[in-house]
Image: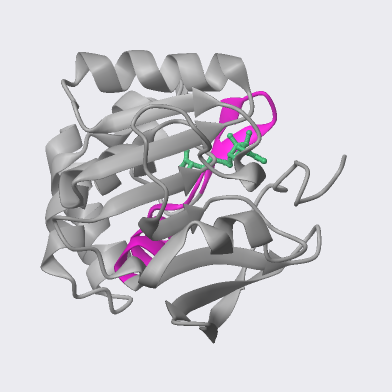
Amino acid sequence: MRFEEQRELMVQEQIISRGITDEKVLDAMRKVERHLFVPEHSRYNAYQDFPIPIGEGQTISQPYIIALMIELLELKSSDKVLEIGTGSGYQTALLAEMADTVCSIERIASLARKARDLLNKLNYENIYIKVSDGTKGWGNTYPSIKEFDAIIISAGAPKIPEKLVEQLANNGRMILPYGNRFSQILTRLTKRGNDIDREEFGGCIFVPLIGKYGWTY
Ligand code: SAH
């Protein structure tokens, strides 16, 4: 089966069938060629219902969990998004299809370089990737953005990274897997003035968020 047909099947059988309805999410998943973001020897599995190793002990997440997290961000085309954990860059591309600007932080330089090269080749001009500890936030790097409309953390956090909450705009949404090393709860925080709304969306399993305001090892 051609990759394009596999991609449509993925959207129908894994994403729509499990209740994702945001057309912008579905369109982005139909468009972005997930097989380009996995190692060559795993391409035949790229559209299957599971995460895939991408090297350095990291994984590209299962398609459905990515779709769910992005839907929960409720993105508008004018939104500035911060992603922690670039990994393969697949989710970065989906976000770039839907939002104005995507700033993405990855702590492992070799993964960041690979993702940056591929996203450049695919002609994305609204993605900025930096190698750093994402739990500290975007900082003074170009583009200078002090507050993000949406923040997505793609690794399991043992506590809420306060620095990132600070960089969330009013009415901004943050989605993160929150919990212990081996299982987490998909959690959405929404900033409302001085208050933070908190909602939970079920269990998930992510690689650990390692950094100053995450796991320290
Ligand atoms: N959405 C990505 C998920 C990659 S896995 C994809 O689908 O490909 C999570 C990534 O988070 C890993 O690449 C890991 O190196 C990175 N990571 C873990 N802790 C981090 C931190 N503090 N700052 C930035 N990246 C981090």
199, 52: nearer the viewer: 199
Q: Give the range drawn in magenta.
A: 51-71
Residue shown at 54%/40% (left/top)? Answer: 85
Residue 106, image x, y percentages: 56, 31
Q: In this view, does 49 lie above or below 197?
A: above
Residue shown at 25%/17% (left/top)? Answer: 120
Res. 204 visible in picture: yes
Name the image quarter holding residue 59: top right
158, 28: nearer the viewer: 158
Residue shown at 64%/44% (left/top)? Answer: 136
Q: Relative to 178, is 36 on the left or the right?
A: left
Q: In which quarter of the image is the N terminus?
A: top left
Res. 46 visible in picture: no
Would residue 5 be counted in the magenta stretch? no
Residue shown at 50%/22% (left/top)? Answer: 112
55, 153: nearer the viewer: 153
Q: In this view, does 10 lie above or below 40?
A: below
The quadrant of the picture showing ligand 1 is top right
Residue 202, image x, y percentages: 56, 80
Q: Relative to 123, is 14 on the left or the right?
A: right
Residue 159, image x, y percentages: 75, 65
